[in-house]
Image (tube, grey):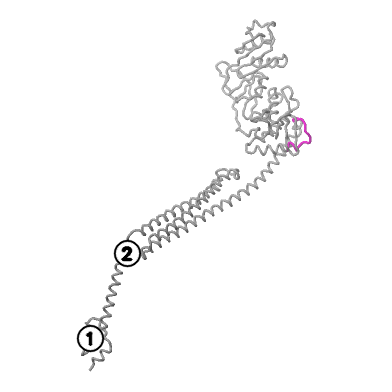
């Protein structure tokens, strides 16, 4: 009760008595006070059990009993009690306005004069209730923090010296629009700050000089910024504010879609009206229509995107099929070349064993065959590596819409399977050809005992044949006189001597 009384008294002094209030995290300083106002503040702080200090016009510490008109104006400093973690305590409306403009990292904002809580996407505003001693001073209400979304400063073109475009829209977006009460003073103050921030998040550009909101269209639209304050909120009714809330929530609900939605809505806002004017009046008349048109345009763009996606998938399927076919052809060529090289090696070994060809000729021929196989394997593997690099480079540019698992299933696994077949075939074939080359070299340059024996046997056979032929010629030249014919017996040798016919005729009587 005393807390609300103190907060209302300070707000009244700021509005009616020209008191200056400065509120920080831990204290509240009120200056330009009369003696009665200073005494009331000190007495209320005493009832609350808070520390407070008074200073006169000469900046001299003054006790409550010494607060007289002669030493006016007075300055009073109020020390706030300890607060829970991640909590900001606010005592006055001036302090609330200051912290809404500046921002604070705390999620829980406790406000002394707040009667109805208000939840946004990353903050919760509740009343500041002091618990009894021993009850603790914790915050019981849980807040659901929405995930980070696209920053408006990434979509709205603005000069680097201007900070009127919010960095994050989540503090200004309601979780439940039904909680908003335009009759509640704090809700009204918060709505003015939120409206000013959200309107700037919808524009394409902010003029660096006039701070006008520019919507490119076509046609191009320029709106005067809304200069709303806590004392001037009559221009924004509840329906207009909630309409802007819905529009900004639709644009920034998904980081990946925020850019296209922002462009569509800005274009529809520019097309909805005809003349430039104040932002409040223009949006009051056109924000609902522009939002509906932007949603329709977005659905149409999704349809076109779906057609493009199907076409891209077809092109991707064709590309991976061609790539797999080329890898298969490279594998087939490698296997054919390896088979040819092995056949050449076998032929060289056979020729060396049978005819005794020059060993250097056999080794050079097999070396050429091995080098040929190596060139084929190298060219095929270079093609495989090139295709792999191209897939990695083009995937984030052309096929970002595909999830990683789908892309792996549709592209990477078939390509890796064909690469694996080529790699295994190339390794096995190359090893076999190298082994054949070593075998041919060994067979060509070692002395084979078997071949020398065969050569010696062939030479001996030829010499024996020559001796037999010479003896036969000599025997034919000798004449044997026979008086009577010699009978032929079966037990004699079958190799008889053939005599000339003329000699047999002469021996007959």
Q: Residue 433: image x %, image y %?
A: 42, 56
Left or right side of 422 for 472 = left
- Residue 217 in view here: yes
Which element type, helix, strand or loop, lies under badge 1? loop
Left or right side of 474 for 112 = right
Tell which residue pokes out farthest to the bottom in this image: 509
**In the image, residue 277 lies in the stretch drawn in magenta:** yes
Count neighbours of disc 2 (C-alpha within 10 A) and say few if under 14, some if 14 to 19, many if 20 or more: some
Tell which residue pokes out farthest to the right in this image: 275
**Tag on residue 480?**
1
Mark 1 in CB contact with mark 2 (< 8 angstroms): no
Front in this rendered view, residue 325 or 333: 333
Front in this rendered view, residue 197 or 391: 391
Taking the spot 73% from the left edge, 15% from the top edge, the residue there is 16
Q: Is residue 504 above or below residue 436?
A: below
- Residue 175 in view here: no
Q: Is residue 385 above or below residue 350?
A: above
Q: Residue 41: image x %, image y %?
A: 65, 12
Q: Residue 370: image x %, image y %?
A: 44, 56
List the residue tagged with mark 2.
Answer: 451
Q: Which residues are magenta?
A: 268-280
């Amino acid at each position: 009760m005393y807390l609300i009384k103190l907060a209302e008294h300070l707000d009244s002094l700021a509005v009616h008595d020209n008191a200056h209030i400065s509120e920080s995290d831990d204290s509240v300083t009120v200056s330009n006070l009369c003696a009665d106002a200073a005494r009331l503040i000190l007495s209320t702080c005493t009832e609350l059990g808070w520390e407070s200090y008074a200073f006169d016009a000469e900046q001299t510490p003054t006790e409550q009993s010494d607060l007289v008109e002669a030493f006016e104006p007075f300055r009073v400093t109020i020390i706030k009690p300890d607060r829970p973690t991640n909590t900001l305590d606010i005592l006055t409306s001036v302090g609330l306005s200051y912290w809404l403009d500046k921002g604070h990292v705390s999620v829980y904002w406790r406000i002394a004069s707040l009667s109805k809580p208000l939840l946004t996407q990353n903050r919760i505003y509740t009343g500041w209730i002091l618990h009894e001693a021993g009850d603790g001073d914790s915050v019981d209400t849980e807040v659901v923090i929405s995930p980070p979304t696209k920053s408006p400063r990434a979509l709205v073109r603005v000069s680097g010296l201007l900070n009127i475009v919010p960095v994050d829209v989540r503090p200004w977006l309601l979780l439940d629009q039904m909680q908003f009460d335009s009759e509640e003073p704090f809700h009204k103050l918060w709505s003015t700050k939120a409206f000013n921030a959200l309107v700037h998040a919808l524009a394409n550009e902010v003029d660096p000089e006039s701070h006008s909101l520019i919507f490119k269209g076509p046609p191009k639209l320029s709106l005067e910024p809304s200069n709303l304050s806590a004392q001037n909120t009559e221009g924004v009714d509840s329906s207009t504010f909630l309409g802007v809330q819905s529009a900004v929530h639709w644009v920034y609900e998904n980081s990946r879609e925020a850019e296209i939605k922002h462009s569509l809505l800005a274009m529809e806002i520019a097309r909805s009206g005809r003349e430039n004017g104040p932002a409040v009046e223009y949006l009051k008349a056109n924000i609902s229509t522009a939002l509906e048109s932007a949603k329709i345009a977005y659905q149409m763009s999704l349809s076109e995107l779906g057609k493009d996606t199907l076409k891209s998938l077809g092109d991707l399927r064709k590309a991976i099929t061609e790539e797999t076919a080329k890898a298969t052809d490279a594998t087939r060529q490698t296997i054919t070349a390896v088979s040819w090289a092995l056949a050449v090696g076998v032929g060289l070994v056979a020729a060396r064993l049978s005819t005794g060809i020059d060993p250097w000729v056999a080794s050079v021929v097999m070396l050429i065959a091995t080098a040929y196989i190596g060139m084929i394997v190298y060219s095929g593997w270079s093609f495989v590596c090139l295709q792999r690099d191209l897939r990695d480079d083009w995937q984030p540019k052309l096929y970002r819409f595909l999830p990683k698992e789908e892309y792996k299933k549709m592209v990477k696994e078939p390509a890796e399977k064909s690469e694996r077949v080529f790699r295994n075939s190339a390794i096995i074939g190359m090893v076999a050809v190298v082994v054949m080359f070593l075998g041919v070299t060994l067979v060509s340059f070692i002395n084979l005992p078997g071949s020398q024996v065969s050569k010696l046997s062939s030479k001996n056979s030829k010499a024996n044949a020559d001796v037999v032929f010479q003896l036969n010629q000599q025997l034919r030249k000798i004449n044997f006189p026979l008086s009577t014919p010699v009978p032929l017996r079966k037990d004699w040798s079958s190799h008889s001597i053939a005599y000339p016919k003329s000699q047999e005729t002469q021996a007959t009587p």
